[in-house]
Image (cartoon, rainbow, N blue to C red):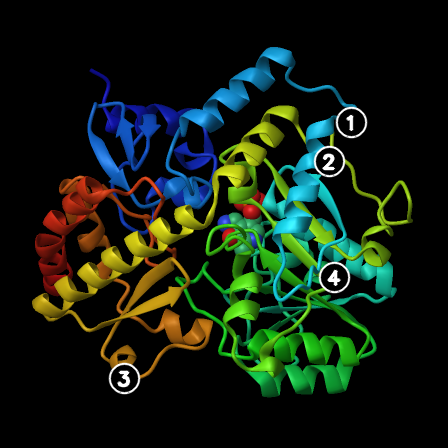
Amino acid sequence: MITNDQLFEASSLSLPGGVNSPVRAFGSVGGSPRFIRSASGATVTDVEGTTYVDLVASWGPALLGHAHPVVVEAVQQAAARGLSFGAPTAGETELAQLVIDRVESNGIRPLERVRLVSTGTEATMTAIRLARGYTGRDLLVKFAGHYHGHSDGLLAAAGSGLATLALPGSAGVTEATASQTIVLPYNDRAAITEVFAQFGDRIAAIITEAAAANMGVLPPEPGFNAFLATTAHSHGALLILDEVLTGFRVGPAGWWGLENSTSSAQEHRYLPDLITFGKVIGGGMPLAALGGRAAVMNSLAPLGPVYQAGTLSGNPLAVAAGLATLRLADAEVYRRVDAAAAAVSNATSAAFDAAGVAHRVQRAGSLFSFVFGEQFVTAAPKTYDDVQGQETWRYPAFFHAMQDGGVALPPSVFEAWFLTAAHDEAALGTIYEALPAAAQAAALA
Ligand code: PMP
């Protein structure tokens, strides 16, 4: 039998770091990644034949669980009709219209037009180019610790404070590019006000994760997203709400829908100009999207001067998977995901308490993660700096003990845990059984 270790050794000779996306390499937890042979419902099975209850869910897309038979059937039927045409298909319109209709709250629909692309990176990259083209301005504001994919201008993440023009966050990003991205601390209204006072007429857009979940989960403070919209709009800039991770995962209309329907305070409601989607919208196939009102979106080619294109954009197999997934993602699915997320996060927190591990549960809808350290017991983190100050070393021991107990967690403390509608009592039972020993391992780390 071939082992994970053997496969990792072999893959490291042909792929940089043995993987095609960095966090898969287990760099921060150590050891060889599991090479997955198959996945079904709430579980993944590796090449050694070990089955794990999966809390990665392909980093979000598997809202319904892995290999949902209806989604697989839709993809198989699409495949039989041809893999890619480079010409329009009816399914693309159906998916775009479904997204336009679904993203609704209190009778308001922020999307009138949608463009389908293949990855979240493309969606945010296009949204930024569109914002710049539409406003005729060059600067972009983003928040430290927010991830929007790996396009050059968005890898500027080193937030060193107010109105500081960022240094490159990645080798290979020119200083000229990085200097057009202003990185600010999250949840810091004064920083926003100050930067707009200084550069307000040069800022094309603010881009923000609808609820941050790429530095662990760190939700916006109530009213923060509305504040961003108001500030941007009063200076003629756009607000790009990145829902690649949260969209159709935390609720049928994403984080925006959740926030605008549950917010009791009228002044906390807001309208983003562009919203980006990925992950769930493609049901596990490479598909992502951006959308907004027609006046902005029609600046895209072929109608407008902002160029964007893709050989495989709106790929028929990906569209089939997305349509099937969104059609199945009804209120009952979200109720199940919410319930499973509450059960797992509460049980994990209780296990940490029992083992004496100081921590805080961070939640944004059904997304959650944990921060470790005494300081978080009394005060929630608000910024990237806050979460970077945690006891990160507790996580690897916890992660490996959970893996030994048959549970596959995200291999980094800075990632959200993902539940699916397929996490039934049996799956949750496996997690509960693994928790006490793993929490003990975290305590002793
Ligand atoms: N935006 C957000 C909020 C994300 O979480 C991600 C991916 N994790 C991206 C953009 C980039 O998406 P992709 O990996 O599909 O390029």
- Look at the picture and state if 361 lies above or below 252: below
Separation (CA) of disc 1 from disc 4? 37 Å
- The residue beneath circle 2 is 93
Answer above or below: position of 354 versus 69: below
Binning the other alpha carbons within 10 Å of mark 3 as few (below 14), some (14 to 19) or many (20 upward) gives: few
Task: Specify the amino acid type for callout 2.
Answer: Thr
Q: Are marks 1 and 2 in contact (CB under 8 Å)?
A: yes
* Badge 1 element: loop
Which disc is residue 176 wearing?
A: 4
First along the sequence among labels 4 and 2: 2
Position of the C terminus, as image quadrant, is bottom left
Q: CA distance from mark 4 to mark 2?
A: 38 Å
Q: Name the residue at 81% across, 61% down.
A: 132
Query: Mark 1 = which residue?
Result: 88
- The residue that disc 3 covers is 378
Residue shown at the point (32%, 48%) measured from the top left: 411
Q: Pick the residue in front: 444 or 309.
A: 309
Q: Position of residue 276 (x, y in %)?
A: 64, 53
Residue in front for this viewpoint, 173 or 445: 445
- Amino acid type assigned to the residue bearing label 3 in the image: Thr
